[in-house]
Image: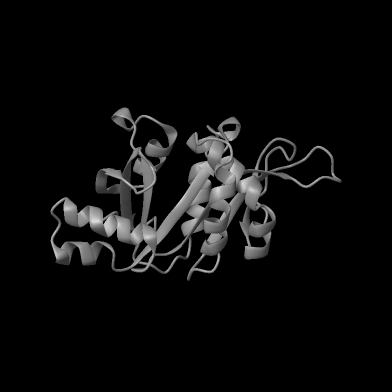
Amino acid sequence: MRTVATDAQTTPYLVDLTPPEFRQRLFEALSIYVEAMGYPRGTEQSRAPMWSEHLHRPGWRAVGALLPNADPMQPDSLVAVAYGYHGAAHQWWHQQVRDGLRRTGHSPRSVEATLEDYFELTELHVLPSAQGHGLGGRLCTRLLDGVSAANVMLSTPEVAQEDNRAWRLYRRLGFQDVLRDFTFAGDRRPFAVLGRRLPLDGPVA
């Protein structure tokens, strides 16, 4: 389904990506991820198998933002992407967050309640050249529309005073702290784990 644009030549439009469409654009999406996150080039190759495996997880869904190509014979360019799936106990991210919550003193009951029924917003990235036009919020809203889980959770790098577009977006959408200054295995940067209840237009907590 195509979103109506005010200027079809310059305004990205959103599309739901099926698994075959996502596979076709996998390295285009990974390039956005690497640039947005500041990872070194070549990271795409190591992350491709993991992103491909995620396609098979329960509840997987993805949304992309496409910029119309001036040449009608060429495909429109992917400038933003978001995807996620239902979290489960055997998944790496779930296990990492569970261990982090335990180490920071959360009770077993609290840990279980936090991780009982959630949708993991695994990736949400916008090319720097396409940022500042509300794409992140549109992607997040569309991705989470109709998700059946009780909560949504995500992780994002810590930044001073939460002063970047990602943090402002998540706070504006009502995401609250679950775990702060957490280091995932394989990444030296501290991350925050954030969450909120679904649907997005419902109560935050």
In this rendering, the answer to whether 100 lies above or below 188 is below
Q: How many labels does the image show?
A: 0
Query: Is 48 displayed left or right of 147 in the figure?
Result: right
Residue 37 or residue 204, whichever sits in front: 37
Residue 21 location (% of width, % of height) = 68, 59
The part of the image, by quadrant, that contains residue 102 is bottom left
Examine the image and state in which quarter residue 204 appears: bottom left
As drawn, which residue projects farthest toward the right?
A: 73
Closer-to-camera residue (4/67): 67
Rendered residue at 48%/37% (across/down) = 37
For the C terminus, the image quarter is: bottom left
Residue 14 shows in this picture: no
Residue located at (52% from left, 47% from top): 138
Q: Is residue 99 visible?
A: yes
- At x 64%, y 57%, the residue is 22
**Quadrant (top left, top right, bottom left, bottom right) of the N terminus:** bottom right
Q: Position of residue 95 (x, y in %)?
A: 31, 61
Q: Where is residue 79 in the image (x, y as percent from the top left)?
A: 63, 41
Q: In the rendering, at what x and y percent does residue 11 appear?
A: 67, 38
- Is the image coloured rainbow, by chain, by secondary structure, or in one colour? one colour
Asked whether, in this view, residue 126 is left or right of residue 185, the answer is right
Near-viewer residue (138 or 97): 97
